[in-house]
Image: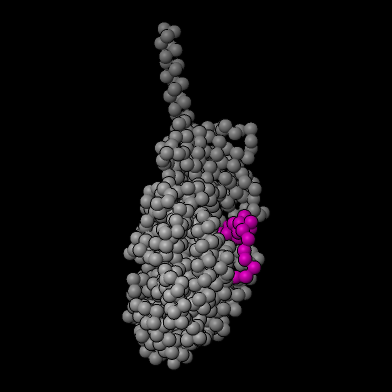
Amino acid sequence: ALGCLGVAIFFAMTIGIISWQALEQPPEEWVLRGRAGGVLWERRRGALLLRALPAGRTAAVVVVGGVPAAEPPPPRDRCWHDGGQFCYAWEEDAELRVSLEPPPAPGTECYGVRWTPLRPDVALKDCFSMANVSWYGGASVRAQRWPLNGAESPAQPFVSGDFGESPAGYGPVLERYFLGSTGVTVTVAPDVPLFLSLESNRHFCLESPAGRAAVPLDYRLCLSPDVAAAHRHHLVLAQGTTRPGLFPPHRSPIWRYHGPEGSAAKIKRGLRSLAKRLKRHRLQEGVLALGERCTAVLAAAVRPDHVPPERRKRQDSAGAWDPSLVAPLQLSITLSPYTSIASPLFLRSLRHRQTDGYWLSLQPPIPLLTMWKGQLCARLNVTSEAALGWFLARARRLRQALGAAYVVFEGAEGNALLDRAVPPPAELVGDRYTAALAAALTTLGNTTIISAGARSSHLPLFVQMSPLRSDWGHAGLKGVIPSVLHYSLLGYNFFIPDAVGGSLAGDTPGDPELYVRWLQLVTFLPVMAFSTPPWLCCDAWVLNLTRQCIQRHRDFVVPLIIKYSEEWLRLGYPVFRPAWWLSPTDPTAFTIEDEFLIGDEVLVAPITEKGQTWRDIYLPGEGQLWQDTNSARVFDGGTVLRNYSASLAEVPVFVK
């Protein structure tokens, strides 16, 4: 009887405990609590919640992957003696540590989140929900969106890439920084390997790779009153980054050369012909831009490294380049860290035993070969001081010999070792190749242009944007403003947009309306670039409009950019700003991707839809006034102008 009674009591207690866990325990439990907010654990989804106090609004939902999410952390954690930390371990899987971090500014609170796998095969994954949150920053994608919610990408290494080589990969500019419209920022530690995936309108996920070593997932969450305050406070945390005293100058517009390139003589004749044509059309200002192929042909003529010294004198007079042939236009040349294995330059390095350390290699002295523009090439080893010194000295000599005012460096993006599934050394993990090359190129002065940006937004370099399609979609004209906002948010305010009308795969603009709307947009960006001159695509009216846009860029836009560049030097604020910069709590402003601000005083709202001569325009800043520069009419901020007229000859621009 006593035994039966004991068994009955045991079963009753078991059922009671299960019922208490299922019914009595709260669905959410505080993990760490600060003054302005805190982190909770939600049992149902196995998620961390970042919640603001005292209002109790949820700023971010982080769904945990890679560990048994249904297992709840206990009420008393392993760091109970430290009120600023929470620690919990999922047996044999991973350990979680959440800690309060020093705040960057009053009203903002930060939490460090670090996952440590307890086995090498554990891949950690934290997914940030897009429900009721608009996210910005991170990586550029092929058809850029603003916010990122509409983008889609499979899990892949968080490394800059070339859309021409990998359309589904990430683009040339990225930073480990994400900003949410609820006032939350996510900053991933720079020293951990990282994968990123984007699932349209659901979530984006930070992942650590599983492999031979246990790789942690380490990031910082910060919570601020609104989205604009969150970004400003993030810039306070980044104040350790030194910005240059002089921002990079650039003479606009750029005219890309697409003439004959078979020999140095043909290139010279082509350049003279283009210069004369520009002068005839009263467009003789700016820069003539040579691609890498033309630069190599001219380089071989003016400084033929493979020619014996006794023959070099005879060729110098024939190959000499005179910059006055295209004056007052200036010249830009293009180089890259790639060298064809069939080139005289690479063969000479073999003869002089320079391959050991000069080129990236799997096993020195054998260089790692990769494809670049259809050729098998070796890539410069940016971790070697000798290799960098040789590369930069060659660039200086070539710039001087050709009288070039600007040097463009293509091929800075990507990680050749990761492409070959080879674990890179510590100094080349992730996007460090791009960062190291960018830092080295600053020694050439602030007239240098680079094709990618990562950890280098503070450097005095122009960044060349990716080529776009000649169409009206997000891979074409509609993707320009999202790219502008993305670049500027991440600190890359000095960029060169793609040529008017798009230039991907040699597309020639065949739609005069598209050409005009594209021209109107880039008038308000740092540099105007042309691949197809206006007289080749359109009529005399468009040619005259081009002259007007170039003059407006010089007289109205450039002074504005200089003014707000000085503010960027002091505070780090972006030069080109989204609508929510002046309306940080208005949900309408969070998803506007077809207009932008220059500083706080000019709003640009171009037409990006084919056939339209009207559009809706959101005027940010409640309580402020905006004046239309075309009609002089004045409107209240914080309102939407419905069906606002904009003929083909107009672009809506408002001054505060």
Viewed as shown, does residue 382 lie left or right of 225?
Answer: left
What is the span of residues highlighted in magenta in the rendered image?
226-247
In the rendered image, residue 504, in percent from the top left (x then y), is placed at 36, 71
Viewed as shown, does residue 559 lie left or right of 142?
Answer: right
> Image height check: is 470 above or below 273?
above
> Image height check: is 554 above or below 145?
below
Q: Quadrant of the C terminus?
A: bottom right
Q: Quadrant of the N terminus?
A: top left
In the image, residue 293 lies in the stretch drawn in magenta: no
| Residue at x-position 58% and y-position 46% | 111
| Residue at x-position 59% and y-position 77% | 560
Q: List the single residue furthest toward the right.
A: 106
In the rendered image, residue 40, in percent from the top left (x then y), is placed at 53, 42
Query: Which of these two is toward me, 502 or 16?
Result: 502
Which secondary structure type mostly characterizes the magenta part of the structure? helix
Q: Is residue 633 visible?
A: no
| Residue at x-position 64% and y-position 53% | 104
Res. 85 image quadrant: top right
Query: Which of these two is toward me, 292 or 461?
Result: 292
In the rendered image, residue 463, in percent from the top left (x then y), is placed at 50, 68
